[in-house]
Amino acid sequence: METTIDHTADNAQSDGKNYLNQTSGILSWIFTLDHKRIGVMYLVGVTLSLLLGGLFALLVRLQLWSPDGLLVDNSTYNQFFTLHGAVMVFLFVIPGIPGALGNFVLPLMLGAKDVAFPKINLFSFWLWSFGAIFFIVTLATGGLDTGWTFYTPYSVQSSTAVLSATMGAFILGFSSIFTGLNFIVTTHRMRPKGMGWFQMPLFIWGIYATAIIQVLATPVLGITLLMLFVEKQTGLGIFDAAQGGDPVLFQHFFWFYSHPAVYIMILPAMAVISELMATFSRKIIFGYTLVAYSSIAIALFGFLVWGHHMFTSGQSAWAGLVFSTLTFSISIPSAIKVFNWLSTMYKGSVRLDTPMWYALAFLFMFTIGGLTGMFLGSMGADVHLHDTYFVVSHFHYVMVGSIMFAFFGGVHYWWPKMFGVMYNKFSAKLACALIFIGFNTTFFPQFMLGSRGMPRRYASYLPEFTELHQVSTVGAFILGLGVAVAVIGLIWSLFAGKKAPQNPWGGSTMEWETATPPITFNFNETPVTKPIYDHSGLVYNEATGNWDRVEAPSEA
């Protein structure tokens, strides 16, 4: 396998300005075509979205401190949980890792100067920004109370700002499509000489599989939201049973996109974890080919399982049986990844740096999320658990816990390369511990709430659920504190952090061979490739904190 540059970039800094200092002024960032700057702008945007969505989550948990509600009336509570879900899903979870880390890292890993279509890449970010603005408009013009799924008929009847929210999600869909198209073409056309498909880092495999889903599935969501927009404006009757329409049809359309979208969220997270496991275990990833193929398998299976969200919708028993079987089948490629990551660590020289803490936390979260998903994939169990807090907890373990830990793991891993500074290791590990404790304290009790019959999305509840709800609320504030410590620690490092060495973790893929931070066009020379995940030539230099590559002497 070949993916690492065969030369060093120690003198790259003197040959050209790094991307951070190439030009100054806000307009130079807004109109930049540099994939690294676009990745940084995505990073800022999705982090702000995470904080906003988290704020709504804290308001939801405060409301549920007491059985009769602590803060607001039922209508306002509906807006809290709707905007929490919509902001987190559409503005953070889906674009987070591909937009921020994918944009920054993927061309560097390929030894390319940029993505295939830099202008489309910038346009994708602008579209994301415009979509985010529509959600801000939604906040200012009556809120949204439909749930993030926009289910009909209620979304048609609601007096809240459904139109601005659906328009925002519609625009965000185009951003996702253009980003996916760019990554597909970049992966096909811009690999360096000597890098075949099975010489690519597994991060690229994960982003590539994600891009396939973005391009193929997202148009379905766009069409669905467009039909909802027309229905609400004209009363056309597409989803109105009184006019011969079918409200359940909206659910089929929505989940045909949204279950593949689950893998738009989790596949990039898995891609990050593959890199962290190899680097911090000091080993070649175990079962590279199977891990690569499993990314494609997950992408394909993701299109076939949407019906497990609709076991209680009245679909036939045979349809339910087929969707249940396919749901269990998709666990196989996911399990392949988990077992291969564990095998990579086995007998490895595991280094417990901050990114590896997040990777180990990811394994814990994803395993719980995957195992609890098996209950919901079984029709008999799902009838009892459907629309309870069990679903809320399962969803958050997979879609929020796993992805958030992978996101922070990837950010901490590539932060020294992105900005040329090291963060405080103690505060970073403290943040990881707080997030881990807070997340599990928040959501594990919700499995018990759901199994005992507590419905989700209720602003009030029976008194016997009070204790578990209060434990969950305390956990939410610990989680919020952990996220705040992580974000503040990273920002603080920009002003007070020590200068980062070129390769602080001993990574063996191409991005660690560039200058720190990278120069504008990434490389001064055309990369020449050699084996990836090969740590044998790296020696730690205690004086510099860098892992230097020592080439084997050539034969005379």
Image (spheres, rainbow, N blue to C red):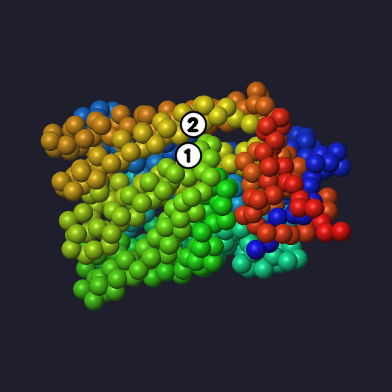
Q: What is the crowding at mark 1: few (fewer than 14 residues within 10 Å), some, or many (at least 20)?
A: some
Can residue 170 be seen?
Answer: no
Judged left or right of residue 231, residue 510 is: right
Residue at 53% from the left image edge and 40% from the top image edge: 351
Q: Residue at x 53, y 45 (%)?
A: 349
Give the image location of residue 550, x and y in percent. 74, 47
> What residue sits right under mark 1 in the picture?
357
Q: Residue at x 25, y 39 (%)?
A: 445
Left or right: 35 in relation to 266: right
Q: Which mark is residue 429?
A: 2
Q: Position of residue 386 (x, y in %)?
A: 23, 55
Which label's residue is closer to the chain start, 1 or 2?
1
Task: State if disc 2 and disc 1 touch (CB < 8 Å).
Answer: yes
Which residue type does callout 2 highlight?
A: Lys
Which class describes the residues within 10 Å of circle 2: few (<14), some (14-19), or many (20+)? many
Q: Position of residue 184 (x, y in %)?
A: 62, 64
Depth check, front residue: 349 or 316:
349
